[in-house]
Image: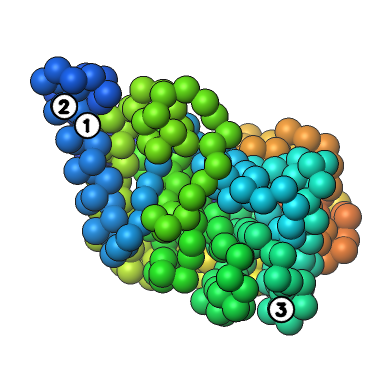
């Protein structure tokens, strides 16, 4: 099977897995314990966290480790917003379900949630954002790179607008961005990512935030991790996460240029086929979303799997629902185009021959 669904999850890097196994053998103690094994585990937790900050060039930041990015997004958004009983929250209509559903819950609680529309390139209007901001805005939550089409929001310009309003904080979902694109973290108050999207292990998300931000807890238990994520820490996974970051950031530019060539090759190979390319030209090269004529996404996915290719449809967290894919519908207002979409997502593991084989099968599927 040839795998083209790296936006959904990545295989664990061999060195990362070895790091995890070694850490599990040597640092299995409970990091809250006062005995030698507990003290060693807590030291390794803090060491891995500080190494992560150094890799990101972060100063005056805090971080907590969660079960996944969904939990991290929940803790970040609820943590900021619930400090105030009322106020405005601004987000987009193309967010990941882990943000979108939080916003729906906050609406029920009486908060004023504004959903910014996007254009056909999947980008918000900075003017729309400026108009939506008020002195009562508590949070702006934006996905940095959209997980369906790969559109890249202008976080620097968004940050400039948000900073004009003292109450407002900027949260960015960076799940599809970490280890793939350069990021100026100083523009961001809170950001989230997931280890399994960077060739780390499943079961670990990360929330980083400026240390002058006081978050309200939504979980209750022990006082570990500032009381925001109570429970026993998975220190071996935290150590492995930092290892995954090191490996990916070391070759980020090389990987980007290589994957971009694969993306451009596939675009060129299918440009004369009756296939619609949904990802904008300036999107992340790691994601290419297409729509096939008269073939819904699930059927196309199944046909491709029968031919030996694994691709995605919508968000892997909501792809089993039957609703119209919201990102594509927001971009094109075309239900058929949204329903007929599949997502091809690349990695440095893929080869040019993989792309050419995929192209051949796509031609067969669309009967060219």
Answer whether residue 105 is visible to the viewer in this image: yes
How far apart are the alpha carbons under marks 2 and 1? 5 Å
Residue designated by label 3: 130
Residue at 60 percent across and 54 percent down: it is 147
Q: Is residue 113 positioned above or below 323 on the image? A: below
Label 2 element class = helix
Is 274 or 91 nearer to us in this picture? 91
Residue 322 lies, in percent from the top left, at: 83, 37
Crowding near pointer 1: few (<14 within 10 Å), some, many (20+)?
Answer: many
Asked whether the residues under the numbered discs 2 and 1 touch, taking CB atoms below 8 Å apart as contact, a structural biologist would say: yes
Residue 183, located in which quarter of the rendered image?
bottom left
Q: Earlier in the sequence, mark 1 or mark 3?
A: 1
Residue 162 lies, in percent from the top left, at: 60, 72
Label 1 element class = helix
Residue 39: give its label.
Answer: 2
Is 294 or 204 nearer to us in this picture? 204
Residue 102 lies, in percent from the top left, at: 70, 43
Residue 37, located in which quarter of the rendered image?
top left
How far apart are the alpha carbons under marks 2 and 3? 49 Å
């Amino acid at each position: 099977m040839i795998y083209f669904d790296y936006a959904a999850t990545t295989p664990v890097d061999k060195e990362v897995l070895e790091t995890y196994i070694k850490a599990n053998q040597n640092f299995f103690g409970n990091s809250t314990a006062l005995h030698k094994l507990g003290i060693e585990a807590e030291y390794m937790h803090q060491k891995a966290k500080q190494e992560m900050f150094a890799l990101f060039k972060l100063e005056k930041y805090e971080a907590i480790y969660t079960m996944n990015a969904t939990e991290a997004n929940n803790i970040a958004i609820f943590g900021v917003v619930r400090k105030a009983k009322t106020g405005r929250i601004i987000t987009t209509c193309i967010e990941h379900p882990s943000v979108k559903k939080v916003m729906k819950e906050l609406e029920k609680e009486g908060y004023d949630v504004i959903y910014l529309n996007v254009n056909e390139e999947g980008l918000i209007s900075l003017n729309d954002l400026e108009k939506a901001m008020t002195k009562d805005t508590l949070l702006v939550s934006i996905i940095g790179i959209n997980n369906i089409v790969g559109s890249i929001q202008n976080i620097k310009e968004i940050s400039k607008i948000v900073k004009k309003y003292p109450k407002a904080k900027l949260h960015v979902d960076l799940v599809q961005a970490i280890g793939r694109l350069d990021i100026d973290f100083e523009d961001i108050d809170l950001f989230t990512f997931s280890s399994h999207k960077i060739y780390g292990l499943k079961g670990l998300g990360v929330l980083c935030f400026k240390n002058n931000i006081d978050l309200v807890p939504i979980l209750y238990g022990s006082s570990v991790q500032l009381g925001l994520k109570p429970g026993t820490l998975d220190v071996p996974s935290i150590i492995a996460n930092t290892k995954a970051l090191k490996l990916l950031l070391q070759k980020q530019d090389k990987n980007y240029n290589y994957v971009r060539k694969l993306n451009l090759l596939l675009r060129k190979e299918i440009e004369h086929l009756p296939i619609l390319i949904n990802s904008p030209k300036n999107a992340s090269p790691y994601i290419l979303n297409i729509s096939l004529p008269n073939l819904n996404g699930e059927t196309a996915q199944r046909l491709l799997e029968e031919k030996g290719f694994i691709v995605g449809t919508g968000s892997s967290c909501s792809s089993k629902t039957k609703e119209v894919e919201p990102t594509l519908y927001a971009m094109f207002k075309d239900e058929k185009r949204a329903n007929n979409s599949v997502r091809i997502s690349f990695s440095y593991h893929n080869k040019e021959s993989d792309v050419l084989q995929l192209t051949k099968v796509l031609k067969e599927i669309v009967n060219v």
